[in-house]
Image: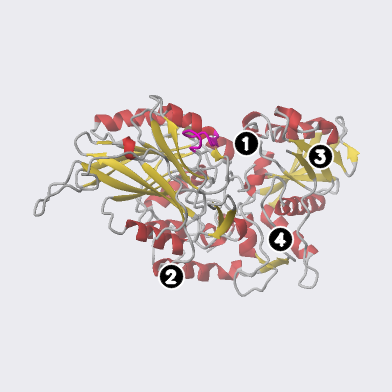
């Protein structure tokens, strides 16, 4: 599995409060010789008529998730392959730096458009999540974002709240956060071509948008993954229907063509998994798209050739490669990792005679949002404003750690910590609670030992805990048979999770072997599943703590939706806070868990 946490999560806990580019380029092959007129060259002095070919700069990013400040730990780094075959990590991200990089990239490019691939908000750190992500929308406005697709996280608080982020207006419950100022909403359009209102059968937001500059026209169609209802709480998608990505894009590509728009970019909140985690890995080696797998491959192969480029997301991976369209012609497919650590710079050469993109000259590269450039002062001011408002809640200490508690790995130390916290809380609700299970997508960041502010090294603040678990899921108890429990573990690697396993994080006492050399359900070695050293009894009853999303069968864990004896507890972050306060102090901090409960065979 990827070291990056899965981006699948639910609703936020905000209702509980009042209130020049660095790096080695990854080139998406396709560079071929073009006429000398490309980029408005070929004009004679004194003549204003543009040449036949015009280079359009497409800047793109995805999965920002409200990370206005530089992300902590591994979430704030990228891996770069070196010429000698080694790799190094680079600190990356933060909108103060992203703004500078994008502004520098645009210099001298009057034909420049900036687009995003969804999940701009949701699963956000406290500075944004506490305020229903209004700060992130403000930041994106300042970044001069032109257009974005929706992602699954745009539905964490439901379609009505998404509409407010688009159109503006103060929150219906928490009101206006800045006295005398009404939230104005997004300056850019959110596109939701495949998200229909069940009653009207029409898209809830615009399906497409056309960028125009001096006779150049490029259409953008935005979709999110069809399986959004499987990775978002039922409340968030109530009254909505999500249609097939390919069928939707093909439909609107035809509609754009009828309107005379022949250059089209698809913004798709669904993605792939490159063979390497390095952002500059060549996923076209040895051939186009050979080094990438995942849902985006089949999607790309079936989207109409009328679409000239695909900006993708959702998997938090980095790639800029080519995948053949249905006619066998190479087409660029990109993703800029997540959290604002990268941006993609794609050149689309527009043919003014045909109105289409000359695809033989499309080139794309991912660039690192390094922290070595000057900070954008307007972003610094924005961050300072919202941090000041969040400080009374965010700066509160909730625990102490003796070292970094990582979110990396099939089983991660932070996953163990959260599962243990939910087990402890479950035992408070019901002493018969046996174990806890935590979905990996619910873990958004590590806990880092180094102080972020003035709290001191090793101190865990509420804001840091919020960044790890930014949703108001409750801790729920259910009863299952031993046979059902083993089936839950098998669902990690079967069904919708077969291609990309979602390995649950488990509480102390539960152990088993995961053999990734095998296929299907056999990857979970059934007779290895033990609780406190004793084999799981298929006929016995076990009391299990999970978050409310898993208790509803989310993330493909249908068996978890079949438990009995439901008991609903408090907020999952409250459970983590309680555990940290009870089990750590400044003189006796918690050590990072060993993450040795699952034996992984690769």
Does 433 appear above or below 136?
A: above
Q: CA distance from mark 2 to mark 1?
A: 40 Å
Quick check: can you spot residue 564? Answer: no
Disc 1, disc 3: CB below 8 Å?
no
The residue singled out by tag 4 in the image is: 577
Mark 1 is surrounded, within 10 Å at the Cα level, by few (under 14), some (14 to 19) or many (20 or more) other residues, namely some
Does 326 appear above or below 208?
A: above
The residue singled out by tag 3 in the image is: 512
Residue 285 location in percent, x, y? 50, 37
Q: Quadrant of the N terminus?
A: top right
Q: Is residue 225 magenta?
A: no
Quick check: can you spot residue 113? Answer: yes
Q: Which mark is residue 500?
A: 1
Q: Which mark is residue 381?
A: 2
Q: Which residues are the magenta region?
A: 284-294
Pointer 4 or 2: first along the chain: 2
Residue 510 location in percent, x, y? 82, 44
């Amino acid at each position: 599995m990827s070291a990056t946490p899965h981006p699948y999560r639910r609703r936020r806990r905000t209702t509980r409060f009042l209130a020049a580019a660095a790096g080695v380029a990854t080139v998406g092959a396709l560079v071929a010789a073009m006429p000398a007129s490309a980029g408005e060259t070929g004009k004679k002095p004194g003549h204003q008529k543009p040449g036949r070919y015009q280079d359009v700069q497409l800047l793109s990013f995805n999965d920002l998730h409200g990370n206005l400040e530089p992300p902590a730990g591994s979430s704030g780094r990228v891996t770069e392959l070196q010429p000698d075959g080694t790799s190094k990590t680079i600190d990356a991200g933060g909108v103060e730096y992203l703004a500078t990089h994008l502004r520098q990239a645009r210099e001298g490019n009057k034909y420049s458009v900036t687009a995003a691939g969804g999940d701009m908000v949701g699963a956000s750190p406290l500075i944004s999540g506490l305020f229903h992500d209004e700060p992130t929308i403000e930041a994106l406005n300042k970044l001069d974002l032109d257009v974005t697709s929706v992602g699954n996280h745009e539905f964490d608080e439901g379609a009505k709240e998404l509409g407010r982020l688009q159109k503006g207006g103060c929150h219906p419950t928490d009101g206006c956060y800045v006295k005398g100022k009404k939230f104005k909403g997004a300056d850019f359009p959110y596109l939701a071509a495949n998200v229909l209102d069940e009653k009207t059968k029409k898209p809830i937001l615009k399906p497409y948008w056309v960028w125009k500059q001096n006779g150049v026209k490029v259409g953008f169609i935005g979709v999110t993954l069809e399986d959004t209802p499987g990775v978002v709480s039922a409340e968030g998608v109530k009254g909505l229907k999500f249609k097939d990505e390919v069928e939707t894009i093909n439909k609107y590509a035809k509609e754009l063509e009828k309107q005379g728009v022949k250059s089209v970019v698809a913004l798709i909140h669904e993605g792939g998994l490159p063979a390497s985690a390095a952002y500059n890995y060549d996923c076209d080696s040895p051939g186009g798209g050979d080094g990438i797998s995942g849902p985006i491959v089949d999607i790309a192969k079936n989207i109409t050739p009328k679409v000239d480029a695909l900006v993708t997301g959702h998997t938090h991976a980095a790639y800029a490669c080519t995948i053949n369209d249905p006619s066998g012609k190479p087409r660029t497919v990109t993703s800029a990792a997540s959290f604002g650590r990268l941006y993609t710079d794609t050149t689309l050469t527009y043919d003014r005679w045909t109105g289409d993109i000359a695809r033989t000259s499309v080139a794309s590269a991912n660039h690192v949002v390094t922290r070595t450039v000057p900070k954008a002062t307007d972003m610094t001011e924005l961050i300072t404003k919202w941090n000041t408002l969040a400080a009374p809640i965010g700066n509160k200490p909730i625990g102490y750690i003796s070292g970094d508690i990582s979110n990396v790995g099939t089983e991660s130390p932070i996953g163990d910590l959260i599962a243990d916290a939910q087990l402890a809380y479950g035992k408070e609700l019901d002493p018969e609670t046996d174990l806890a299970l935590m979905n990996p997508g619910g873990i958004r960041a590590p806990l880092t030992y180094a102080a972020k502010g003035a709290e001191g090294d090793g101190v865990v603040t509420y804001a840091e805990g919020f960044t790890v678990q930014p949703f108001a899921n409750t801790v729920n108890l259910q009863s299952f048979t031993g046979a059902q429990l083993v089936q839950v573990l098998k669902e990690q690697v079967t069904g919708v999770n077969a291609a990309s396993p979602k390995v649950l994080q488990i509480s102390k006492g539960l152990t088993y072997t995961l053999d990734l050399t095998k296929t299907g359900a056999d990857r979970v070695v059934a007779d290895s599943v033990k609780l406190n050293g004793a084999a799981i009894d298929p006929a016995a009853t076990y009391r299990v703590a999970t978050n409310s999303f898993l208790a509803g069968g989310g993330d493909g864990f249908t068996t978890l939706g079949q438990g009995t004896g439901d008991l609903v507890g408090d907020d999952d972050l409250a459970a983590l806070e309680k555990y940290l306060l009870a089990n750590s102090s400044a003189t006796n901090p918690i050590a990072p868990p060993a993450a040795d409960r699952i034996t992984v065979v690769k």
